[in-house]
Image: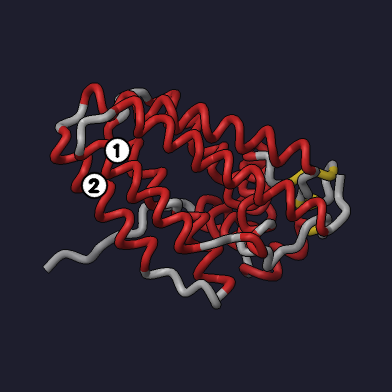
Amino acid sequence: MSTKINKLTLSEQIYLALKKDIVLNKLPFNKKLTIKDVQDMYEVSSTPVREALTKLANDGLVTLIANKGVTINDYTLEDSLEIQEVAFLLDYYALKYAMEHASRDELIKTLKNAIIKHKEIDINDDESVALTFYENYFHNALYEFVDNKKIIEIKEKNRIEFAVVAFKARATFEKENRNEDHQKIVNAIINNNKDLALELLKDHFESGKKSVIEFYKQNKKR
């Protein structure tokens, strides 16, 4: 019986842990995090910490403070809408590509399985909701059929920021509406109506955009 080996480097493990904590807002916006803070958190040397913080900066989640640490980035309304627009354009491409190149049965099966995962969310538990934005089951499922590494790389970076923005506006998150939107898209694919599926995806993002605008309006953040 073989033992499963964790192939992630120490810096990658720290990076993933910090990234998740930022999405969950366990590390709040505008918080300053020194290299020493992170060293103490994980009981490691400064080298893997610097590497992890640099990766987070490349993701757009933090701003580096020269030789000291980072500040957790906050997002304005304008930032949030731009992130959502990029997410829509990427997902539109992914859905269109999947419908044109993937087996329809396999695509339907994959998206249905993703919807099942979404239905398991506990809407009353912040961490459950946040992790759903972080995992993004339905939308990530579209990319299982995309054969373009550069598109995937861009999507990964965008989705990290998207998760932060979406969870930030979680007060307006409506589980059932999101699930219904996803199911309507699948139904359109089942009926071989590609144009409708793409239009429904657009409507889905427009709904999310309105939710984010409402959140900033309620919190008087411009």
Residue, x 69% and y 37% (percent of image)?
Answer: 81
Q: Are marks 1 and 2 in contact (CB under 8 Å)?
A: yes
Residue, x 19% and y 48% (percent of image)?
Answer: 109
Residue, x 71% and y 64% (percent of image)?
Answer: 27
Residue 43 percent coordinates (x, y) = 63, 69
On screen, residue 219 versus residue 97, left or right, reads right
On screen, residue 212 versus residue 68, left or right, reads left
Residue, x 48% and y 29% (percent of image)?
Answer: 90
Residue under numbered circle 1: 144
Residue 80 percent coordinates (x, y) = 70, 41
- Colour pattern of the rendering: secondary structure
Q: Nearer the viewer, residue 2 or 14?
A: 14
Residue under numbered circle 2: 110
The N terminus sits in image quarter: bottom left
- Disc 2 packing (10 Å; few <14; some 14–19; many ≥20): some
Name the kind of residue labelled 2 in the image.
Answer: Thr
Q: Which mark is residue 107?
A: none
